[in-house]
Amino acid sequence: MEEQRFDPTHHPVERIRASPTEAPETDPSALKQLIAEKVRACSRDLAAPAAEHVVQQLAPDLPRERLGELLAEMAAEEGFGDIKAVVAPSGRIYLFSDASLARNDAAEKCFLEEVKIAIVEKVRKDSLLIALTPMADLERFFPWPEPEKRLALVAELRADERFRDIQSITGPGGELYLHSDDHVSSNYGKIMVRAKANRPGLSIAEFVRDRSRVMPAPTQVAVFRDAAFALSPAQVEAFLDGLARPEPEFADIKKLVHPTTGAVYLYSDKWLDEANAFRIMDWDEVGRAQNP
């Protein structure tokens, strides 16, 4: 939606024009009543317009063009005089009952829905390119400058079932990033955030802690060669050398060396004891191959 904004006083539209098209077999009168009931319930009980996708769910097989025809017919029929529409610049339709919801209030809610959709589209596009979306990149979409209002809208967005793939990650400095876990997993997102912090020790330690806690399993040091970590071999070696006299921040990170293969693993003793860490390492290094 780029930077489009719509003004409640300039964009309300009460009739939807649609080109004629064939509709599947359905009772138009009954469907119109269902639409009106749904729209009235949203306006009355939720103080919000019914977005186009909500109305479409009442007849999921009905072509969008035919739905437009029905709405246009309703606008001219006596029993639906309270049902009004707002069309956003995106072309999405929002319906409300002016018996329960004022036009300006409906238009404002429509605008906020458009903001949410624009944010989600931006985040999903970035994630498709394997990139996180910092909140700073979303500034142009928000209608207010207050950080608390922006965070509240993001929280509302994330609570919406339609946008369940949108996740957030907080960086070491408190900065917020969004991503779609359809394309970037939460674990991979954390790796990228830590890499952005330019703290190699933190990137390694937090990844090791995550695996020790969640899997639970130790981490082979070789994984830190992945480009997502943005770590050089020298940085990884410096961290391993530092474990001989670890800083308090990394005191829970322990090293294991497999006696047969020489592979180096790390684990956090906050979440995984040495015996279990060794057992899992041994299975990964030699046990799995011996027990196909």
Image (tube, rainbow, N blue to C red):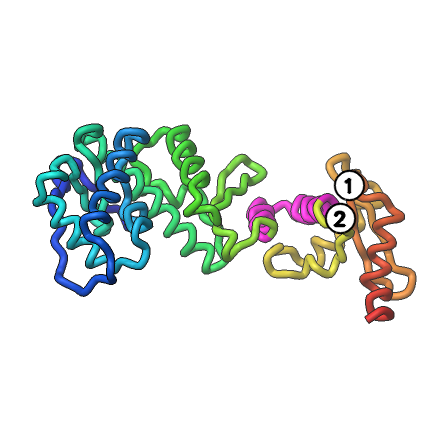
The x, y position of residue 5, in whole percent, is: 22, 42
Of 207 and 292, nearer the camera is 292
Residue in the picture at 27% in, 58% down = 62
Residue in the picture at 32% in, 31% down = 46
Residue 144 inside the magenta-drawn segment: no
The x, y position of residue 42, in whole percent, is: 29, 35
Seen in the picture, residue 195 relative to 160 is either above or below; the reply is below
Q: Which SS class for mark 2? A: loop
Left or right: 143 with respect to 212? left
Residue in the picture at 24% in, 35% down = 40
The reply to whether dot 2 and dot 1 touch (C-beta < 8 Å) is: yes
Residue in the picture at 21% in, 37% down = 96
Residue 210 inside the magenta-drawn segment: yes
Left or right: 63 with respect to 215? left
Please report the bounds of the magenta region as a residue range. 188-213
Label whose residue precedes the other's in the sequence (2 or 1): 2
The quadrant of the rendering that contains the C terminus is bottom right
Of 261 and 291, nearer the camera is 291
Q: Is residue 201 visible?
A: no
The residue identified by callout 2 is: 216
From the image, give the main secondary structure of the stretch colored magenta.
Answer: helix
Of 94 and 150, nearer the camera is 94
The x, y position of residue 49, in whole percent, is: 26, 37
The residue identified by callout 1 is: 271
Q: Is residue 6 visible?
A: yes
